[in-house]
Amino acid sequence: MLMTWFQFLAGALLVIVAGARLTRSADVLGRALGLGAGWAGVLLLPLATSLPELVTSLRAVIIHAPDLAAGNLFGSNLFNITIIAVVDLVQGKGPIFSCVKRGHALVAFLSILLMSISGTGILFPFLTAPEDLLGVLVYTQSLLLPAIWLP
C-alpha cells in the first residue's frame, strides 16, 4: 500500500512539473502560430492536459469500471472550476473574470451545455435510448456531445 501511495505522489509531482512546462510551451507556440494566449489556452493546453483524463477514462472503461470513468471526468471538471475560484481568491486584483476576454463566454457556455447533456444522460437514461444506426448501437447523447463541441 505504501508503494502505491509513493507511485501516486510521484505521478502527481510529474504532472505538476509537466503542467508548468506545458504552459510556457503553449504560450510560445501560440505566439509563433499567431494564435495569441487566449486561443493557445483554449486549443493547445486542453489537448495536452486532457490526455491523463483520456487515458484514465479509457482504462476504466476497459476494466469495466464506468463509474470510475465518469467520476474521473466529472471530478476533473469540478476540480478545474475550483482552481478558478482559488486563483480568483488569491490573485488579489479583483474578480478574475473581469480580466479575461469576452470570447471565453462561448467556451463557458458550451461547457455548461455539454455538462448538462451529460448529467441528463445519467439522471434520465431512458431519454437517450439506443437507436439502430447502420447496425451500430448509438446513443443520442453520444452524438450530441461532439456535434455541439466540434463546430
Image (cartoon, rainbow, N blue to C red):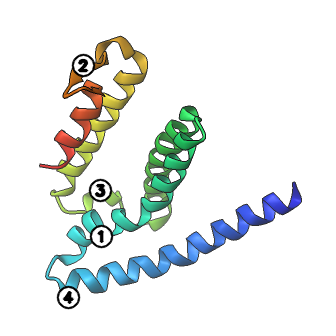
At mark 4, the secondary structure is: helix
Residue type (three-letter) at the residue carrying disc 3: Phe
**Label 1 vs label 2, nearer the camera:** 2
* Residue 107 position (above or below residue 5): above
In whole angstroms, how far apart are the C-alphas of marks 3 and 2? 41 Å
Mark 1, Cα crowd under 10 Å, few <14 / some 14-19 / many 20+, is many
Of callouts 3 and 2, the N-terminal one? 3
Q: 65 or 5, which is in the foreground? A: 65
Q: Quadrant of residue 46?
A: bottom left
In-image side of 44 versus 11 (left or right): left
Of callouts 1 and 2, the N-terminal one? 1
Q: Which residue is mark 2?
A: 131
x, y percent for residue 117: 30, 29
Q: Which residue is mark 3?
A: 97
Residue type (three-letter) at the residue carrying disc 4: Ala
Q: Which residue is mark 4?
A: 32
In whole angstroms, how far apart are the C-alphas of marks 1 and 2? 34 Å
Q: 56 or 42, which is in the foreground? A: 56
In-image side of 81 versus 38 (left or right): right
- Determine contact: label 4, label 2, CB under 8 Å: no
Q: Residue furthest top?
A: 126
Of callouts 4 and 2, the N-terminal one? 4
Residue type (three-letter) at the residue carrying disc 2: Glu
Q: Which residue is mark 1?
A: 44
- Determine contact: label 3, label 2, CB under 8 Å: no
